[in-house]
Image (cartoon, rainbow, N blue to C red):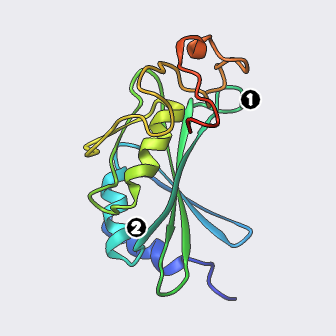
């Protein structure tokens, strides 16, 4: 029987981090790890030291209307070991009113704009981020448009934004 993808990584993480609950799963040969937000920074540092040297993406999912969801937001990190090609999906959960996670910028500098995009669209803050401000929307925009409770037509936030013509852009 061949070992599952990431089995060496799983063993190394579990031997180094003993006080956190780590839920591992494999789906279509993709290794997944769910970790509590309280242990996220510790786990991510260990993953970096074990060869996960590239943070490919950070995104979030609003679980508001998921029938069996117990948490409001799921934050998803996609990691890559550029030497071996091994990939890992790391998930954590946060709930209102404390939508704060530690920033991964000190571990992977590429997390800079990725975390800002998640903040801009979902309102999840990344503590310790060097420049946590809106990236895609104007500073005056007060809502988070990828949340499930945000209306499709908006809340009228754009009524006083200046209109830019094609010639001006």
**Residue that mark 1 sits on:** 67
Asked if residue 18 can be seen in this view, the reply is: no
| Vertical comparison of 70 with 127: above or below | above
Dividing the picture into quarters, in which one does residue 119 lie? top left
43 displayed left or right of 158: left
Residue at 36% across / 59% down in the picture? 43
Dividing the picture into quarters, in which one does residue 63 lie? top right
**Residue that mark 2 sits on:** 14
Counting the numbered discs, the total is: 2
Residue at 43% across / 20% down in the picture? 140
Frontmost residue, 73 versus 149: 149
If you read the primary sequence from the N terminus, does the residue marked by circle 1 or circle 2 appear first?
Answer: 2
166 displayed left or right of 105: right
Name the element at disc 1: loop
Number of the front mark, 1 or 2: 1
Quarter occupied by the N terminus: bottom right
Coordinates of residue 133 in the picture (x, y in percent): 36, 35
């Amino acid at each position: 029987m061949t070992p599952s993808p990431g089995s060496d990584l799983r063993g190394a993480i579990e031997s180094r981090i003993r006080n956190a609950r780590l839920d591992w799963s494999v789906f279509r040969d993709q290794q997944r790890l769910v970790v509590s937000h309280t242990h996220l920074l510790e786990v991510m540092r260990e993953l970096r030291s074990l060869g996960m040297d590239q943070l490919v993406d950070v995104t979030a999912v609003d679980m508001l209307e998921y029938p069996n969801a117990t948490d409001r937001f799921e934050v998803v990190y996609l990691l890559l070991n550029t030497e071996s090609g091994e990939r890992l999906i790391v998930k954590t959960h946060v709930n209102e009113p404390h939508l704060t996670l530690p920033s991964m910028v000190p571990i992977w500098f590429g997390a800079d704009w990725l975390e800002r995009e998640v903040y801009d669209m979902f309102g999840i803050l990344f503590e310790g981020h060097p420049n946590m401000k809106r990236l895609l929307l104007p500073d005056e925009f007060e809502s988070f448009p990828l949340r499930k409770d945000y209306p499709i037509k908006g809340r009228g936030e754009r009524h006083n934004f200046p209109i830019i013509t094609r010639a001006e852009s």
